[in-house]
Image (cartoon, rainbow, N blue to C red):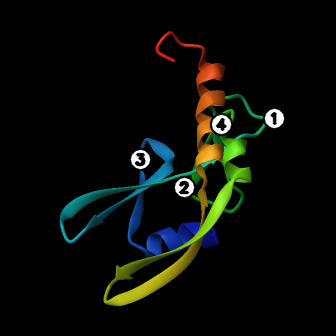
Amino acid sequence: MSRLEQALSNAEFTPDPQRVWRWQSDADGQKAVVKFELLADLEYAPAGSLVSFDDCKELGAANLRGTGFAARDFLPRTMSAQVGGNKYYVDVKVTGLAGFLLAKIAAAYGRRKEKD
């Protein structure tokens, strides 16, 4: 199991059985949908395909064109969570508005659907 999978499990997330890139939380019998979604923009893999990670049992990503823009425009943020009576902190790279918008535009352009 990878360190990221272990960290997600420690934070009481479980993988969505139909989407390897989405993990959720179900604490104390009350389902709280907390989405942890991983995206990739890999040229060697087909758009829309699932990407597996080395040393991961269940964690993966959706390969979506344009998401590389989001990876280049980020802001560091510290987030915290209370787990089992202990408070944990983590530094996370959060996509900025410009990267988010470019990723969305690239995805819509790639889909070329009437709704976009």
Q: Residue at x 46, y 84 (%)?
A: 88
Q: Nearer the viewer, mark 3 or mark 4?
A: 4
Question: Element type at marker 1?
Answer: loop
The Cα atoms of the two marked residues, 1 and 2, are separated by 21 Å
Question: Element type at marker 3?
Answer: loop
Q: Counting residues from the N terminus, which is met first, the one under dot 3 or under dot 1?
A: 3
The Cα atoms of the two marked residues, 4 and 2, are separated by 29 Å
Mark 3 vs 1: CB contact within 8 A: no
Q: Counting residues from the N terminus, which is met first, the one under dot 1 or under dot 2?
A: 1
Residue 1 can be seen in this image: no
Q: Is residue 4 above or below residue 74?
A: below
Residue 95 % position (x, y)? 60, 54
Question: Element type at marker 4?
Answer: helix
Outermost residue toward the right in this view: 44
Mark seen at residue 67: none
Q: List the residue tagged with mark 3.
A: 17
The Cα atoms of the two marked residues, 3 and 1, are separated by 25 Å
Q: Residue at x 54, y 73 (%)?
A: 6
- Residue type of the residue flagged with mark 3: Pro
Residue 18 % position (x, y)? 43, 41
Mark seen at residue 102: 4
Q: List the residue tagged with mark 1.
A: 44
Q: List the residue tagged with mark 2.
A: 58
- Residue type of the residue flagged with mark 2: Glu
Q: Is residue 65 above or below residue 16?
A: above
Q: Counting residues from the N terminus, which is met first, the one under dot 3 or under dot 2?
A: 3
